[in-house]
Image (cartoon, grey):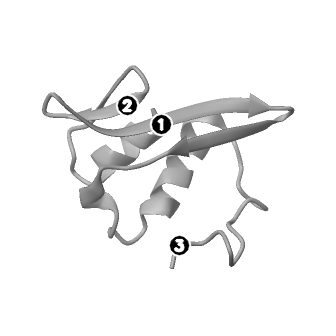
Amino acid sequence: MPAVATCRLFGLPAYLEGEAIWLHGRREAGLRAAHVGQCAVIEGAFPARLAAEPGLEAAFRERIEAQHGWRFDTAWPSGGEARR
């Protein structure tokens, strides 16, 4: 749900169905989450029209923190992980 909430912050009327983000009856992006030990691994994508939005990653992290209480103090991507 944090990914859907993030889409909505940017004005997209997104909803979750199965393991995908949908817009206007069309599957726009997939997502998955799993526990690995005491960590959570989240894999997914946002609809392409959000890819270039400034602040997308920060907004997504804020939605995760708000909805699940997780914190990202030390989980920022390293230089090799960051998008170019």
Is 75 or 83 nearer to us in this picture? 83
Q: Disc 1 versus disc 2: distance between alpha carbons?
A: 6 Å
Disc 2 target residue: 20
23 shown above or below 63: above
Tell me residue 38's x, y (percent): 85, 34
Question: The disc labelled 3 sits on which kind of residue?
Answer: Arg
Residue type at mark 1: give it.
Leu
Quick check: marks 3 and 1 in contact, CB under 8 Å? no
Classify mark 3: residues with Cα within 10 Å, few (<14), some (14-19) or many (20+). Answer: few
In the image, farthest residue toward the top: 18
Between discs 2 and 3, the one toward the N terminus: 2
Residue at the image point whose x is 34% and y is 63% from the top = 51
Tell me which corner region of the image, top left, top right, bottom left or bottom right, holds residue 41.
top right
Q: Which mark is residue 31?
A: 1
| In the foreground, 76 or 83 | 83
**Above or below 33: residue 80:** below
Residue pointed to by mark 3: 83
In this view, 33 is above or below 29 = above
Choose the circle earlier in sequence order: 3 or 1: 1
Residue 13 percent location from the top left of the image: 20, 39
Left or right: residue 20 versus residue 79 is left
Number of other residues with Cα within 10 Å of mark 1, as a class: few under 14, some 14 to 19, many 20 or more: some
37 left or right, relative to 11? right
Element carrying mark 1: strand
Q: Does the CB distance between marks 1 and 2 fall below 8 Å?
A: yes
